[in-house]
Amino acid sequence: MIEPARLVRASARRLTAWMSGLSPAAERCAVCGVATHQRQQQVLWPALIETWELSPAEVDWVDDWEGRQCLWCGASRRSHYLAATICHAARAWLGSSAGSLRTLCRDSRFRQLEIAEINSAGSLHRYLRRCPHLRYSEFNSTSPAVPHEDLSNLSYPDQSLDLVITSETLEHVPDVDRALAEIRRTLKPEGRHIFTTPVCWERQTRQRAASKNGDLIHLLPPSYHGSSDHAAHDFLVVYEFGADFVDRCRRAGFGVEVMRHPVNPMGTAFVTWPSEPASLVSRF
């Protein structure tokens, strides 16, 4: 039997270790709208750091982007910024004043939109699913309640969607140019594709794999996202996007607004729409 004093000391050590990862001040989460502390944890592992050739600073940025989480809803900084970008776009697009996705999903104008969430956008899904016209899908879904969608061959009709949301998905698609063309095809003329994808801004895009005659060919040693022991096909990294990614979107026929995080240099979200004006760069 564990002595009560030892149990208390062990609990105190665990609590101290847990609290050491908290941010010093509360932040308002753009997903749930709650002002709360953030929990910081390490998400990268040595093999992935070596494969991606990340510098120590880039490792810190990625850990911050993926490992800093809202204590209320569990949203990562990436999810927070994607939600903030959706709210930012909705202000100019719909005239909404919502400061969080939770509030935005109550806005009648937003609720009228035909939305495709292609693969779960993390903590955003719990609020997006409240929208009556949400079309939620997962790649290779085995659930009868969740349809399968392949970004390279979407089932949606031409110009049928107001908003497409993807989060950390494009880098896993064997033919990203075809995926961008498919998204553009399905968007209405005033529609938006709002998304995140990893970008290493100090280099050009590096392709790690390619599809040839239906077969996947590895151009570089396989690298996977998810976790250090997760090697599922849909977690395979096909592209390490670089500074040329914006031009790639523009060549696909999109206007592009690049939302650069004010603190994390690697933190980026994108707003694209079916047109071809000069790219914009914003910070908020």
Image (cartoon, grey):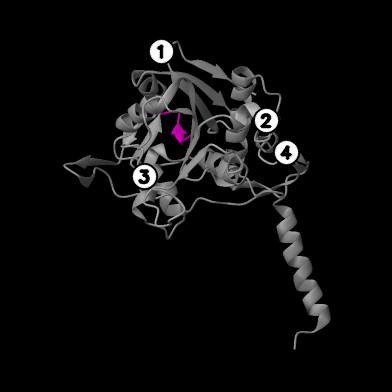
Q: Is residue 264 above or below residue 230?
A: above
Q: Earlier in the sequence, mark 1 or mark 4?
A: 4
Q: In this view, does 254 lie above or below 69?
A: above
Q: Do the residues labelled 3 and 1 touch (CB within 8 Å)?
A: no
Which residue range is magenta in the image? Answer: 196-203
- At a point 39% along the width and 50% down the height, the residue shown is 235
**Residue identifier under label 4:** 33
Q: Earlier in the sequence, mark 4 or mark 2?
A: 4
Question: Could you give the CA–CA distance between mark 1 and mark 4, rounded to whole angstroms?
Answer: 34 Å
SS at circle 1: loop
In which quadrant of the rendered image does the C terminus lie? Answer: top right
- x and y, in percent, of residue 112 in the image: 58, 29
Q: Residue furthest left?
A: 213
Of circles 3 and 1, the one toward us is: 1
Q: Residue furthest top?
A: 277
**Residue identifier under label 1:** 276
In which quadrant of the rendered image does the N terminus lie? Answer: bottom right
Question: Could you give the CA–CA distance between mark 3 and mark 2, rounded to whole angstroms?
Answer: 36 Å
**Residue identifier under label 3:** 237
Q: In this view, does 132 lie to the left or right of 150?
A: right
Q: Which of marks 2 and 1 is nearer the N terminus?
A: 2
SS at circle 2: loop
